[in-house]
Image (cartoon, grey):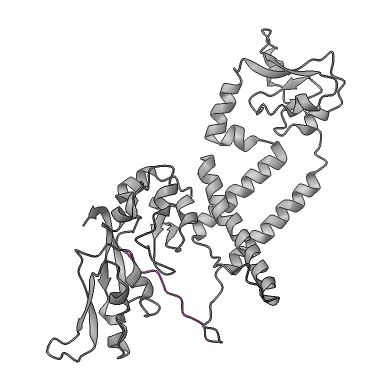
C-alpha cells in the first residue's frame, strides 16, 4: 500500500489511464465527424472497484499532504523516502545558506520544490531536500553554496523548532486542479461501465464472472504461492495486457494482485507481455513457446448452459477456437449420431487460455469455463 512504485502504478492504471482513454475517444468522435480515422475508440472500464478506491484514496492523500505540507508523503509515509531522508541528515555535502550574504528576498524558498528552506532562520531541512540546486541558481546574492557539512552543531532546541512557511499564493490554482481531477475521476468511474448495444436498441447482456474454486494466474507466475509472495500490486501487468484478461483481485487475501478472467477476451498463447514487465518476480519471463505448453487451468463444461441443448442449435465455438485442440464435439446421445453435439474436454491437453469461455455464446454464464490450478505444470 505504501511502496511508491506500486502506488504510482495503481494511480496511473486506475485514474490516469481512463482519463487518457476518454480523451482518445473524444478525439475519435470529432475525427469521425470529418470522415477521418486517425483515431479509433478504445474500451474504457474499471477493472476493480476496490483497487480504484485504493488508488483514488492514495492520490487524494498525496495531493492533500503535498498541498498542505510539501513532501510529507515522500519523507514520512513512503518507506523509500523515509530511509533516504534519514540518510540525508548525515550527508557530507549539502547546500548551506550564508546569513551574512542573505538579504531575505525569499526567492530560494519560492523556487524550492521540496519546501524545505526557512529563510527567516537561514536553515534548510536536509531530510526533505532533494539537492535539485534550484536555490543556488535562483539566489542572485550567491548566499547559497554546495559545500561540506559544517562542523558546528546548532542547539537541539533550535533544531527541533518548526520552520515557518509563507502562505502559498498558488493555493487557489491547486484547489481548482484537485477539484477538476476529482470530477474527471468520478465521471470516468460512472461512464466506464456503460451498457453496450448490438448496433440497434437491444442491450447486449454482459457475461458474468463464474465462481472459480481456484483463481487463474498467468503462465509465468508458476503458482498461486509464488504470486502471493512476490506481487506488490503495482498493476503493470494489468495495464499492459492487450486482451483485458488480467484484473486486480478484490479478495482480502490477494487484494490488488492480478487474476485472470475471460469475459472480455482470452489469454492468447503468443502473448507474453505481462511476464516482460513484472518487476517483482511474481510473473517470471516466459517465451511464447514455453507459454503454449504451460497448463494454468483446465476447462469445465456446464451442461445446463450449453446452447445446442438449451436452444437446439448447432454451435461448436469452443472446439473451433481452442488453440490446443483440447475440445472435441460429440453427439449428446451416444445412441443417436444425429443428436445435438456437445463438447468434451481433454484436460491433459487443455492449457486454460480461456478461448472457449470467452467465445461461448451462452449468456450470462458461459457453458464452459476455466478452473485454475494452484501449481502450473508443463504438458
- Please give left or right for residue 265 compared with residue 22 in the image: left
Q: Nearer the viewer, residue 148 or 10?
A: 148
> What residue is at 68 percent from the left and 60 percent from the top?
183
> What residue is at 72 percent from the left and 55 percent from the top?
179
- Do we see residue 165 in this rendering? no
Query: Residue 156, position in %: x, y?
Result: 67, 14
Name the magenta segment's main secondary structure.
Answer: loop
Query: Residue 78, position in %: x, y?
Result: 56, 36
Please check the rendered image and state whether residue 208 is part of the magenta-colored stretch, yes or no: yes
Q: Name the quadrant of the C terminus.
A: bottom left
> What residue is at 74 percent from the left and 29 percent from the top?
134
Query: Residue 329, position in %: x, y?
Result: 22, 80
Most extreme residue toward the top is 151
Query: Residue 270, position in %: x, y?
Result: 36, 59
Most extreme residue toward the left is 335
Q: Which of the 4 image quarters holds residue 140? A: top right
Q: Which of the 4 image quarters holds residue 215? A: bottom left
Count of labels shown?
0
Q: Which of the 4 image quarters holds residue 118? A: top right
Q: Nearer the viewer, residue 229 or 361?
A: 361
- Do we see residue 277 in this rendering? yes
Please check the rendered image and state whether residue 1 is part of the magenta-colored stretch, yes or no: no
User: On screen, 308 above or below 299?
Assistant: below
User: On screen, 357 above or below 245?
Assistant: below
- Please give left or right for residue 221 compared with residue 18 in the image: left
- Please give left or right for residue 293 compared with residue 98 in the image: left
Q: Magenta segment range?
A: 202-212
User: On screen, 23 above or below 99?
Assistant: below
Amino acid at each position: 500500500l505504501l511502496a511508491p512504485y506500486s502506488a504510482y502504478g495503481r494511480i496511473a492504471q486506475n485514474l490516469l489511464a481512463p482519463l487518457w482513454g476518454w480523451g482518445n475517444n473524444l478525439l475519435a468522435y470529432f475525427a469521425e465527424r470529418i470522415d477521418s480515422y486517425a483515431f479509433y475508440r478504445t474500451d474504457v472500464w474499471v477493472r476493480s472497484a476496490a483497487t480504484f478506491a485504493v488508488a483514488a484514496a492514495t492520490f487524494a492523500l498525496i495531493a492533500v499532504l503535498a498541498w498542505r505540507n510539501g513532501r510529507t508523503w515522500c519523507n514520512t509515509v513512503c518507506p523509500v523516502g523515509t530511509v533516504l531522508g534519514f540518510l540525508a541528515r548525515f550527508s557530507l555535502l549539502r547546500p548551506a545558506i550564508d546569513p551574512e550574504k542573505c538579504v531575505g528576498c525569499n526567492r530560494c524558498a519560492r523556487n524550492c520544490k521540496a519546501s524545505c528552506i526557512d529563510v527567516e532562520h537561514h536553515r534548510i531541512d536536509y531530510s526533505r531536500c532533494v539537492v535539485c540546486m534550484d536555490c543556488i541558481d535562483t539566489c542572485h546574492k550567491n548566499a547559497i553554496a554546495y559545500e561540506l557539512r559544517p562542523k558546528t552543531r546548532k542547539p537541539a532546541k533550535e533544531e527541533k523548532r518548526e520552520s515557518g512557511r509563507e502562505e502559498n499564493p498558488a493555493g487557489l490554482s491547486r484547489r481548482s486542479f484537485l477539484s477538476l481531477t476529482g470530477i474527471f475521476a468520478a465521471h470516468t468511474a460512472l461512464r466506464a461501465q456503460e451498457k453496450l448495444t448490438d448496433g440497434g436498441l437491444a442491450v447486449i447482456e454482459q457475461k458474468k464472472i463464474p465462481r472459480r474454486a481456484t483463481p487463474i494466474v498467468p503462465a509465468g507466475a508458476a503458482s498461486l504461492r509464488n504470486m502471493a509472495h512476490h506481487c506488490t500490486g503495482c498493476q503493470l501487468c494489468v495495464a499492459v495486457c492487450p486482451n483485458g484478461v488480467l484484473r486486480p483481485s478484490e479478495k482480502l487475501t490477494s487484494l490488488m494482485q492480478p487474476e485472470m478472467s475471460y469475459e472480455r477476451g482470452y489469454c492468447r498463447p503468443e502473448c507474453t507481455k505481462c511476464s516482460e514487465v513484472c518487476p517483482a518476480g511474481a510473473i517470471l519471463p516466459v517465451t511464447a513457446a514455453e507459454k503454449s505448453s504451460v497448463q494454468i487451468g483446465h476447462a469445465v463444461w456446464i451442461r445446463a448452459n450449453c446452447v445446442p441443448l438449451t436452444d437446439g442449435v448447432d454451435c461448436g465455438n469452443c472446439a473451433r477456437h481452442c488453440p490446443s485442440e483440447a475440445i472435441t464435439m460429440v453427439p449428446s446421445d451416444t445412441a443417436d449420431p444425429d443428436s445435438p453435439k456437445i463438447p468434451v474436454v481433454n484436460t491433459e491437453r487443455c492449457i486454460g487460455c480461456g478461448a472457449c469461455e470467452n467465445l461461448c455464446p451462452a449468456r450470462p454464464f458461459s457453458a464452459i469455463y476455466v478452473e485454475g490450478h494452484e501449481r502450473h505444470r508443463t504438458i
